[in-house]
Amino acid sequence: MKRKRTVIIFIISAITVYMIFSGIWLFSGESSSEEEGLFVYCGAGMRKPMDKIGLMYNALFGIKVIYDYAGSNTLLSQIKLYRRGDVYMPGATYYIEQANKSGLILASELVAYHTPVIAVPQGNPKMVTKLEDLARPEVRLVFGEPTSCAIGRLGKKILEKNNLWNYVEPNIEAEAATVNELVLWISTGVGDASIVWKASLTGTEDKTDMIKIDEENNIIKKIPIGLLTFSEKKEEALLFITLVSSEIGKSIFQLYGFDPYYEETESS
């Protein structure tokens, strides 16, 4: 299996290099006209890199990728209910583990790290510099729904880890089902601060500021991608998963602010 995956990665790399030097622009072509393609459930926070990878996959293999972007837990509920589709890519391994316990995952890979940060409107009007500032009564918070999206669940865990949840919770004025909604709310001044993924702020630098969370206070997650048990296109789905988790896929994630996952550098 490992040898087969290595061969697939080599083929993908070779075809990609050929297409680039042949003048084929992988990232701007139209999707194929096929009515049915590969169906991928994907966390909303990975939309930008996954859109690009989907276009690349279509250009390479003539199979379009159909995405359902939503909160990780919302997607898991849909998978359990409808039992259709090919690939599941949530924002944290917790959801793949839950899917695996339900017998929904055949195989999985790790792609990148998801790093939580504090997002504030540009200029940081409330002078938020650390987690403790989220407990100040004048700071209006927007937060991810802990029952719907990965960053909401994780944000609560981070605050609990630092004994701040009970002090911060009263400041939450609105909850969102996806991290993209949180970034929009911060960009437009609906809230004074939020905990979001670092990569979700890529491209919003003119509207938001980012405050890093000290590593010892933070909880950094890994982004997995898994093959669904009931996929009717397992070979195509495995090829897609291989592309996403390859050097090429990880480099696209890196372009959008993610830190790629490399097993050899992971600390025990």
Image (tube, grey):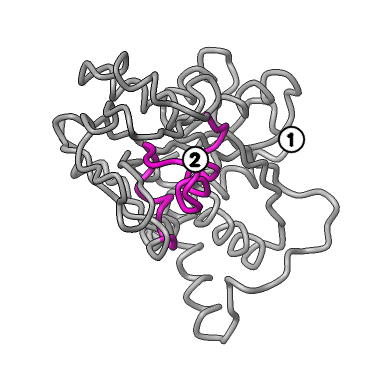
Q: Position of residue 111 (x, y in %)?
A: 40, 44
Residue 103 falls left or right of residue 114: right
For this rendering, which residue is in front, 229 or 91?
91
Q: What is the secondary structure assignment of the residue under circle 2? A: helix
Q: Amino acid at mark 1?
A: Glu
Residue 265: give x, y in percent of width and height: 18, 44
Q: Residue at x 41, y 56 (%)?
A: 253
Q: Is residue 28 above or below residue 122?
A: below
What residue did someone put label 1 on?
A: 232
Q: Relative to the observer, which residue lies in front, 5 or 227?
A: 227
* Extreme residue in the front direction: 138
- The amino acid type of the residue labelled 2 equals Val
Residue sitting at x 67%, y 19%: 80
Rendered image: mark on residue 179: 2
Residue stretch in magenta: 175-204
Number of on-image labels = 2
